[in-house]
Amino acid sequence: QPGGIPGPLPWAAGDLEQTHVAGGRSRLVHIPLSESAADSASRRASLLAGVLWDRLGFEGARFDIVLVESVDRPVLAVGPGFLCLSPDRLALLDGCAVWDDTLSSGIRPAGPVVVANAARAFLAMSSHLPGYLSASLAAWSVYLFVDAGGSTEDAENILECFRRYYLASTSGMSGEEYAIADASLAGSALEEPVLMGKAPIVLAMFSRVMPGFEPGLRAALGRLRHPGAALLSLSSAVGLSGDPSMDSLFWDWMCMPGVPQLMVRWRESGGRVDFS
């Protein structure tokens, strides 16, 4: 319109088909594909959507995958409740069993980026979810996807890659490291290592040692009605108030910088070594 704000170049789309995936919880909207290509796309989309629904699903969530073709470049775009990508990006999910080897060699594989962006799209439907939690959960979703689509060993290796990335990034930095939930972390030099290295390991630990963590997380994601109350809502939903040790563990890891520093003493006597 004259005098209006010019928008982005439009995308022409049409002749699309849709298939329900992940037990009918999500849709795969796609361009016409051959039967074998459609089956492969449905399998990949179902695995991706299924992991998000099973591990992060909450009331009010929605997640659809839209496959489009681009003339000259791959497509990967995120919107609230949907992921728009080209078939070649979706096919990257097939290599999850070797993502740990690629990461260990110092190369970032493209597959985890697809999973993390899918998680961001899924979590965008949670009102007032702060950016640091969205980023942390998106990084954790890479581990969850490998755990579902690969093997337990592959998933543990992903966590080890996260740990090495975090430690390598923080060991040579002279700047201050902020806690996962510290507002000062945003824009700092260590924001990415903390949220993409340390945070997913912390979330994996919570999932293992807190019996109500994942159900509580899903409940909290569905009822974030006010900004600034995400951690309190999560703590309440997990039921940490009834267990002081777990409550302390949760708040220490989310609100304190760095990692615990342990001092270990050992003593050898009579062929026996004692640690304290």
Image (cartoon, rainbow, N blue to C red):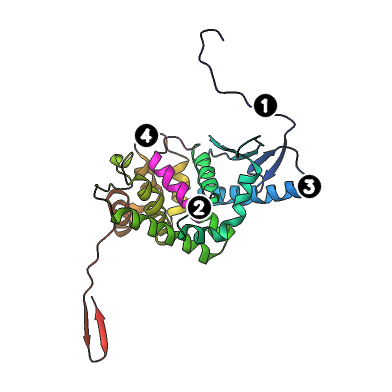
Q: Image quadrant of residue 267?
A: bottom left
Label 1 vs 2, first from the N-terminus: 1
Q: Residues within 10 Å of mark 4 (few under 14, many from 20)?
A: few
Left/right placement of residue 238 relative to residue 42 reads left
Q: Residues within 10 Å of mark 1 (few under 14, many from 20)?
A: few
Q: How many marks?
A: 4
Mark 4, secondary structure of its residue: loop
Instruction: Give the spatial CA distance, label 4 vs label 2.
Output: 26 Å
Label 4 vs 2, first from the N-terminus: 2
The amino acid on which the numbered mark 4 sits, given as a three-letter code, is: Pro
Instruction: Give the spatial CA distance, label 4 vs label 1.
Output: 37 Å
Which is in the foreground here, disc 3 or disc 1? 1
Residue 142 within the segment the image draws in magenta: yes
Which is in the foreground here, disc 4 or disc 1? 1
Residue identified by numbered label 1: 12
The amino acid on which the numbered mark 1 sits, given as a three-letter code, is: Ala
Left/right placement of residue 83 relative to residue 32 reads left
